[in-house]
Image: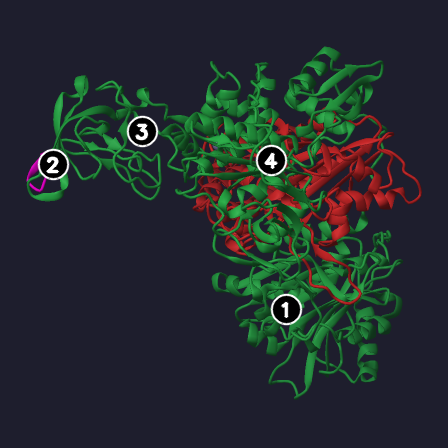
Chain colours: A red, B green
Amino acid sequence: MDTTARREHWLRAIAAAADPAALAAIDTRLFGPKGEVPEFVRSVTALPKDERPAFGKAANAVKVEVEQALAARREQFAAAALAQELAGSAFDPTEPGPRAARGTLHPITIVQNELVDLFTSMGFRWEDGPEVESEYFNFDALNIPGDHPARESQDTFWCKAQPGLGRNLLRTHTSPVQVRTMQRLTRQGFHAPLKVVVPGRCFRSETVDKTHEHTFYQMEGLVVDRDVSTANLIHTMKTCLRVILERDVQVRLRPGFFPFVEPGFELDVNCPFCSGRGCSVCKQSGWIEILPCGMVHPNVLRQGGIDPEAYTGFAFGMGLQRVVMLRYGIDDIRQFMGGDLRFLRQFPEVAR
Amino acid sequence: MKLSLRWLSRHVDLTGLEPKQILADLTMSTAEIEGLERFGDGLECLVVGHVRQCERHPDADKLSVCQVDLGAAGGVVQIVCGAANVAAGQRTVVIRPGDTLPAQGGKGALKIKASKIRGVESNGMICSEAELGLAEAAPGILVLPADAPIGARFVDVLHVQDWVFEIDNKSINHRPDLWGHYGFARELAAIYGRELKPPVVPVPFPVEGRSVAVEIRDRDACPRYCGLVIDGVVAGPSPHELRWQLAAVGQRAINLPVDLTNYVMLDLGQPMHAFDARHVGTGPIRVRRARDGESITTLDGHKRKLTAQDLLICSGDKPEALAGIMGGEGTMVEAATTTLFLESANFHAATIRRTSMRLGLRTDASARFEKAQDPANAELAVHLFVDLLRRYCPSAKPLGPLVDPAGFRYEPKRIVLRRARLHQKLGLALEDPRVLGILESLEFGVTVTAAGFEVAVPSFRATKDIAIEDDLVEEVGRMFRYDNIPEVPLRGVIEPPVRNEELFLQRRLLEVACTDLGCSEVYNYSFVPDAVVDACGAAAHAYVLVENPTAPEQSRIRRHVLPSLLASAVPNLRQHAEVRLCERGKGYHPEMADEHQLPHEVHELAFVWTRRDGAHPFGELREAIAALLARLGYPAELQRVWHGKDQPWVHPHRAVAIDRDGSPVGFVAHLHPAIARTMALPATTAIACLDVRALLANGRKIARYQPVPTFPPLPVDVALLVDEAVSVAQVAEFLRTVGKKLVRDVQLFEVYRGERLPAGKKSLNFTVTLGADDRTLTDQDEGKYLGKVREQAASIGGELRG
Ligand SMILES: [Zn+2]
């Protein structure tokens, strides 16, 4: 066979290979030990000297062409195989794998952590206080003496007398930490500013129903510095509510009476459920009471060892359940203490 | 407390103001309004009818058949009426068929239909005050004045409809002046810049004549007592305008003198008592403390035992009333009363409050006195009472002088309000005229000085409310309206806040426990139910006890978190086959006290991992806790068997201590099987508890860098047969020691117990990772290592398997 005939023969064989195995067999036949192609190239030695250069050149060209044809055919098979692999198996995008851990923080914890993050970023320290508290810190130090009507309205759980223990109670608010913190920090003289938040559990003797709980969570805040004003309080509270409720809240500040502040305020936010038109959640007022606050009463500063002439301050006590309920749309306060995983697992987030 | 708009309008002109607007403005400047209701709502459909004819029903003695002229509102119609007092010639209130009487008290709305009553056609109904919701009960139909225009709307003829504001009493606890309409009218006058009319025009009393002497034995408890004898009283029902005015604010009408004492109280906030003068006799009226063991029967029929703290109003020595709270039985004015002894006094707030609290007897009077009423009102109230009484009962007249032995001379309290202090506390520089205007509108006397304002406090604000400069800041701020103060950010040095490490650690522990370990955080009450205490075998421990628990079986405050957490696992396990709970909480131990005489407090983080069946979760929880602590930088050793003293829920032999540098900070354990049974929990329940403060004590450990190995590691599987008594930690330590420096890591991957092993033995299967810093290890190294293990296994009573 001459060069042209061989070339035709080999290329046809390559083109005819049905699958990668057939192609591999052809590859072996052509280029393996004693392969037809190298044999053919070597057959140059049998030719007369003057024919050798021309034959050699032509034979090499055929060799290269056959090699390329082989490679191209291999590519074709690989591409077809890949195409088949990609198209091949059925795919269900909804088929789950093994379940990820399903732990959850309590929704009050989530919101409390966010508030702590917010206030610590504004330079507040995060502190804690006891839940079994003395009458002094819960009432007397806060300008609520023994016969003050405010004591009665707080529905206090009192502790039974026990040897070695004083007249104690379950704290009715987080405010006792105001004087506790001031006393602790003024022992070696006061260094302004004092900025602290104290979230925690409080108690008032109430019958539990959909909207009342005897165990509740507050977050106390206290700022004492030179020249702290009502205008500062308004700004700090607005900032806090905007961040935590994740909306541009409307707030209103109106008078509220608490013996440990003067003046005292109630801070309301516009009702998210009815956009202020009035609904059952906001008792038709369009506003939700969320934050009692005020300018620290001079008597409270004095109890804390701080001169009310030199320093002023503001304090607030945010009801955490209320904030959590607003944020997640929870309508039954009993869920918080109910311990039911079907409730708790609805809030898989952590503080952002 | 309820406020009537019509009533307020008598003191200040409120024309042009919507009730909703008034509600909003009072809320923003004065007190919280809880609600706004229309009194007499739905009565618009009623018309005035003239009874032309009234005949007995042919078939019923008690019914009358009336021909009633409704004029333009329906002509003459026939109505069957059951009232005894219906008569021809009366002007009455008629509801026509198709109209609806609004719902009243317990009764629903009533739609009127034309019907036949005992065979006689009836086209409507002639109404009584009770049916209109204007009285609790009525003896017959309401008869209107003879000049009431026939066919006119009832609500246009008589002033009956009103707007009623419901005030949140808590928001006026500190404001004695707001316990009557006049005080709110004063606020509205200040808010709207309108004129406030004087509360009463003084009435002249006779200089001589009949009076009853008054002796005040305790001037602290009773700073003022005014008494007046009034004759010619007709104690019949009050006219409808007075009764409806009282009904609008929820006060039941009784008879004219009593209704007027209530009216005055609801107007000025000054409680009064009208005695039948026969009862008081010639007196003298004596105000004295009760004697221990003395008693009085109050007009509600209860006999009350008294103490020396209580204050009595006596006739001579005979108790007639519990001062400021309630009159004695039988002293009240009745229909037959013609002569009154009128008491208008002022009592010490705390005295009244203590008695009222002790006896559990709260009245409208005690609620007002305990807020510290203004003594000036005691006299004003008498003038108002007499003025009104004479209007409704012209025959009534005071018989003698007003007896007022203590009198009241008020020297106004003066407070300096510094301009700088005012501006500083509000954060706003208010101009002087504005401040002056506000204070004067609230009836403060003001002198502007170089430093600010010298303010004279009126007596009605001086009893307890306005005491210091800051109280005046509030007055200015609330009337200016806090909403008008522009917000200003806090300013100051930027410094990171001091960190309370315990709080942050506790928070991170929880976050990791919930996100990494799959725990769900639960909150339980601090009260631990007796049933749970008993089930946990902890009834003998000391607890902080609550005096007034919500339920008797919930008086204990928990010492530890675990019992309540175990209890909350029970219902969850009904819903889920496996439950992982954690809770952070405080426990209280009353046997130890702190420097404030408070019980010792522990801060715990507790875990309960339980599954209905399958493998015991103890090992998983142990690993999880170790990983949790390492994650936070507080790596701990869990090696030592722990024997909990105070915690009976811990398995006595299957508990491991969590140690940091040798001191325990908690434990991981099997739940005690006996407790598991009483709590109805499966035996496959693991528990753990961390004492967060103890954990913190030895500080955080920051990880140390180790060079990453250059040569590949050589993992070797080693299975050792040992006695059950030999711990995993012992064997791991042995495997480490045997290989000396070559051992990089020892990990247990399986504990095998089974029939193929001798009794009392277990096979511990480890992967030991060998490695060297200077070369790649070979099979020879592995062989050498295994050889040493085989040779020395006897030192731990073990045997190399395979
Ligand atoms: Zn709403």
Residue at the disc numbered 4: B171
User: Residue drawn at (64%, 33%), measured in percent from left and top?
Assistant: A256
Amino acid on which disc 4 is placed: Ser
Chief secondary structure of the magenta span? Answer: strand
The spot of residue B282 in percent (x, y) is 56, 45
Instruction: Please name which of the two marks, 2 or 4, marks the residue nearer to the observer.
Output: 2
How many angstroms separate mark 1 from mark 2 (CA)?
Answer: 76 Å
Q: Chain of mark 4?
A: B
How many angstroms separate mark 2 from mark 4 (CA)?
Answer: 51 Å
Q: Residue furthest front?
A: B209
Q: Residue furthest right?
A: A188
Amino acid on which disc 3 is placed: Gly
Residue sitting nearer the eye, B528 or B682: B528
User: Residue drawn at (74%, 46%), measured in percent from left and top?
Assistant: A145
Of labels 4 and 1, earlier in sequence is 4
Mark 1 surroundings within 10 Å by alpha-carbon count, few (fewer than 14), some (14 through 19), many (20 or more): many
Could you confirm whether marks 4 and 1 are on the same chain? yes
Residue at the disc numbered 3: B42
How many angstroms separate mark 3 from mark 2 (CA)?
Answer: 22 Å
Instruction: Please name which of the two marks, 1 or 2, marks the residue nearer to the observer.
Output: 2
Answer with left or right where residue A27 lies relative to residue B5: right
How many angstroms separate mark 4 from mark 1 (CA)?
Answer: 51 Å
The secondary element bearing badge 3 is classed as loop
The secondary element bearing badge 2 is classed as strand
Q: Chain of mark 2?
A: B
Segment colored magenta = B117-121
- The reply to whether the magenta stretch includes residue B565 is no
Residue sitting nearer the eye, B697 or A275: A275
